Image (tube, grey):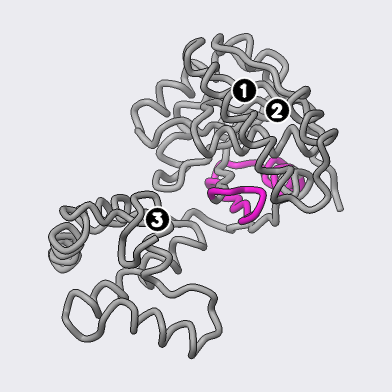
């Protein structure tokens, strides 16, 4: 197995997923700089990391008080982009999914990061080719896409552009393995990567059945679980994701999808049934 030869990693953005990526990387033995826009954001990040240390202790096999504290010790913090990127081998960007914001951030980053630094975006809805022209180094730029709860759902989808150097691609695949992820190499750009290319049509088909009055959500889930052996049906998955994101995706889709969005809104969202986090969605929690 080839080595990434990355030692110092910087994570831009300390939201839910950014903080998980940073902590998992530190837990795996790397020196990590967590960057966010101001001191208040970094203070929130420190609370998130303390929470993750407790979660890892409870949920990660083999985690000890010593290993979760050592991970915290490998994290440093900065709200100065030039300082955060100064000696980074790899920068993983996990800032909000706003194209203009990402483009502007990469223009700044490209100007201050060393020539050696590889840039990886965790974007789930934007293609890396939408961003590559703003990086100043399209050959050293690609997507490295994580799933929420990285310590448990540990896939890392790696997707380059036509400009990405194959050696850089291979190094990022190796790095994903080094931080305990299962790398999923994607050989050309695809919106939705592998997981969402499968999951979104599946979830849409389930809503079509329920919104069309063909079958109740609980029965749709039941037949899927019984017939395939899957642990969860589509509506249980909706509740875990939360209904707002799928609603937004459907609302911006085809006219048929917009009708499905209206059904989700009227029957569930407007009634406060937003999923697990709200205590009720298609199921009550």
Marked residue nearer the N-terminal end (1 or 3)? 1
Establish if 171 lies above or below 234: above
Which range of residues does the magenta coloring cover? 148-174
- Determine the CA span between mark 1 and mark 3: 29 Å
Mark 2 or mark 1, whichever is nearer to me: 1
Look at mark 3 in the image and give the residue it sits on. 276
Marked residue nearer the N-terminal end (2 or 1)? 2
Please state if 280 lies on the left or on the right of 167 as rendered. Answer: left
Which element type, helix, strand or loop, lies under badge 3?
helix
Please state if 33 lies on the left or on the right of 260 as rendered. Answer: right
Residue 234 in picture, x, y percent from top left: 40, 72
- Return the residue found at the far bottom: 227
Look at mark 1 in the image and give the residue it sits on. 34
Look at mark 2 in the image and give the residue it sits on. 9
Q: Residue at x 15, y 68 (%)?
A: 256
Q: Residue at x 56, y 24 (%)?
A: 45
Circle 2 crowding by C-alpha within 10 Å: few under 14, some 14–19, many from 20: many
Establish if 39 lies above or below 206: above
- Determine the CA span between mark 2 and mark 1: 9 Å
Q: Which residue is drawn at 41% across and 27% down?
A: 103
Establish if 157 lies above or below 139: below
**Residues under numbered marks 3 and 2 in contact, where contact means CB atoms less than 8 Å apart:** no
Please state if 137 lies on the left or on the right of 196 as rendered. Answer: right
Question: Who is closer to the viewer here, 147 or 187?
Answer: 147
Which element type, helix, strand or loop, lies under badge 1?
strand
């Amino acid at each position: 197995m080839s080595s990434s030869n990355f030692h110092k990693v910087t994570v831009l953005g300390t939201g839910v997923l950014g903080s998980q990526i940073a902590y998992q990387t530190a837990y795996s033995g790397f020196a990590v700089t967590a960057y966010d826009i101001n001191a208040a954001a970094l203070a929130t990040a420190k609370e998130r990391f303390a929470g993750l240390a407790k979660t890892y202790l409870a949920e990660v096999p083999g985690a000890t008080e010593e290993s979760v504290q050592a991970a915290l010790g490998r994290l440093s913090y900065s709200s100065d982009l030039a300082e955060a990127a100064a000696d980074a081998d790899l920068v993983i960007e996990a800032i909000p999914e706003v194209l203009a914001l990402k483009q502007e951030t990469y223009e700044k980053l490209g100007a201050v990061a060393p020539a050696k630094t590889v840039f990886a975006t965790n974007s789930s809805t934007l293609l890396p080719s939408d961003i590559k022209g703003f990086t100043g180094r399209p050959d050293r730029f690609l997507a490295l896409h994580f799933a929420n709860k990285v310590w448990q759902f540990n896939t890392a989808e790696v997707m380059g552009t036509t400009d990405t150097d194959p050696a850089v691609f291979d190094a990022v695949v190796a790095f994903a393995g080094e931080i305990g992820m299962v790398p999923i190499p994607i050989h050309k750009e695809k919106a939705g990567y592998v997981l969402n290319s499968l999951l979104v049509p599946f979830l849409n088909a389930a809503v079509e059945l329920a919104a069309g009055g063909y079958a109740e959500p609980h029965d749709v889930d039941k037949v899927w679980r019984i017939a395939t052996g899957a642990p969860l049906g589509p509506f249980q998955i909706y509740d875990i994701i939360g209904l707002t994101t799928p609603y937004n995706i459907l609302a911006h889709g085809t006219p048929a999808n917009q009708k499905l969005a209206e059904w989700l809104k009227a029957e569930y969202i407007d009634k406060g049934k937003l999923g697990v986090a709200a205590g009720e969605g298609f199921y009550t929690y």
